[in-house]
Amino acid sequence: MSESNPVALSTEEHRDPLKTTSARTVTAAAVTTVIAEALSFAFGMTWEILWALVLGFGLSAVVQAVVSKGSVTRLLPDDSFRSIAIACGLGAASSSCSYAAVALARSLFRKGADFTTAMAFEFASTNLVIELGIITWLLLGWQFTLAEFVGGPIMIAILVLAFRLTLKPRLLEEARAQADRGLAGVMEGHATMDMSVGGGSLGSRIASDRGFTAISHYFVMDWAAIWKDIVVGLLIAGALAAWVPESFWQSFFLVDHPVLAAIWGPLIAPLVSLLSFVCSIGNVPLAAVLWNGGISFGGVASFIFADLIILPILNIYRKYYGVRMTRYLLVTFYLSMVAAGWIVEVLFGVLGLIPDERNAKVMEASVSWNYTTYLNIVFLTITATLVARFLRTGGPAMLRMMNMAPQGGDEHGHEHGHEEASAYTCPMHPEIRSSTPGRCPKCGMDLVPEQH
């Protein structure tokens, strides 16, 4: 058989430009089709969970509006069982944004909270929150939601035990010294914002004018904090669903070897999460794709738990606590996630709660007049109401403060607390001035020293 002559082919293409143009058109059409398919999957998942996202963030905003962050530190003085339990409860009632949770944990630590308990609060803030459970239920099923709320406390308990056995006082003091430098991370303003309403019954606080304003601000701030993670997570999930063949996942997750798959899943899942750059509830769509692909039940749990060790957050730990503590946190966090995944795998397997079918909702775009559409319309209306309130009550100015360096130090660690202050003022409402510390009557933020 004679071989093709490249020169001859080139000459043929030169002589027939229509054929070359046609080939290029087919290639471009194929690429467009592949991209459209990935976007279709992403939109399909977005439409399915949209109302649940609004519901989850709304409930979280209500809780934050009635629970003062100032009271949190006083409730976390040590690593006793009581303090850890309180930290888990308060964390579950807070924002689901991983960056805000990490910033708030550092803030609690600087104000006197126990480091172990602050880390327990951080874990609960991202793994035990309402919106995570709702989205997990919708995309994966109730068994996975139950696994998150059972496995989360187990993971925290393992982490606390690991800290008690291995965390050296010298390393902790190094971390405290680094934390007190006040280097800026991400979502600092969101982590320290406190607009909670006190006094009166729970219902009256929520229904009050100030309560409605606080709810609207927390709602929009939470969305602003993690919308990028949600969008990126959905796009990556759509791309994986459309482009990666099922045979690859089955081979990668050792589907043909059930025992090895149960061991391998929780081991590899946190590493996949670490490299995905997606945190908060944005990793749930990715978990749905991995489950359909063949990862073990415990692997799904470990993957969702691992949003606190993605590369951007590890870099924040480095700024907050130093390189040595960052390495320590990575190792202990990873091992806790793996162990919790294994325990979930065994426990739910014994109880017969692991689903037999892999039918997570990873679907292409489809909008019809069903309950999902009606719920989306209702909750989008609620969203519009809260956003309008946010815009009318100084929300944009507060939004610009979300990534400001924490009070007490700039991004280079230079302290400002020793400068003389003749008055205290609100960062968002500079016309509010006081001779003593307090809270702004307009937005509820802590008054800060006016610098000269």
Image (tube, rainbow, N blue to C red):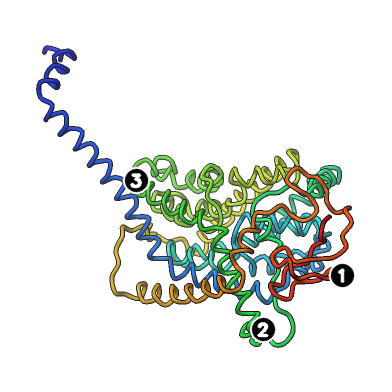
Q: Which residue is mark 1?
A: 436
Identify residue type, mark 2: Arg
Element marked by disc 1? loop
- Is the C-beta separation of discs 2 and 1 under 8 Å? no
Q: Is residue 320 above or below residue 130?
A: above
Rendering coords of residue 204 (x, y %): 65, 87
Mark toward the start of the polypeptide (3 vs 1): 3
* Marked residue nearer the N-terminal end (2 or 1): 2
Q: Which residue is mark 3?
A: 246
Answer left or right for 41 relative to 217.
left
Q: CA distance from mark 2 to mark 1?
A: 26 Å
Distance between the alpha carbons at the discs numbered 3 and 2: 51 Å
Task: Give above or below for 92 relative to 265.
Answer: below
Is residue 151 among the parts visible in the rendering?
A: no
Q: Nearer the viewer, residue 451 or 104?
A: 451
**Nearer-the-camera pick, 440 or 43:** 440
Q: Secondary structure at mark 2?
A: helix
**What kind of residue is marked 1?**
Thr
Q: Residue at x 60, y 48 (%)?
A: 338
**Residue topped by disc 2:** 205
**Whole-number angstrom distance, CA of label 3 to CA of label 1:** 63 Å
Residue at 53 percent of width and 70 percent of height: 56
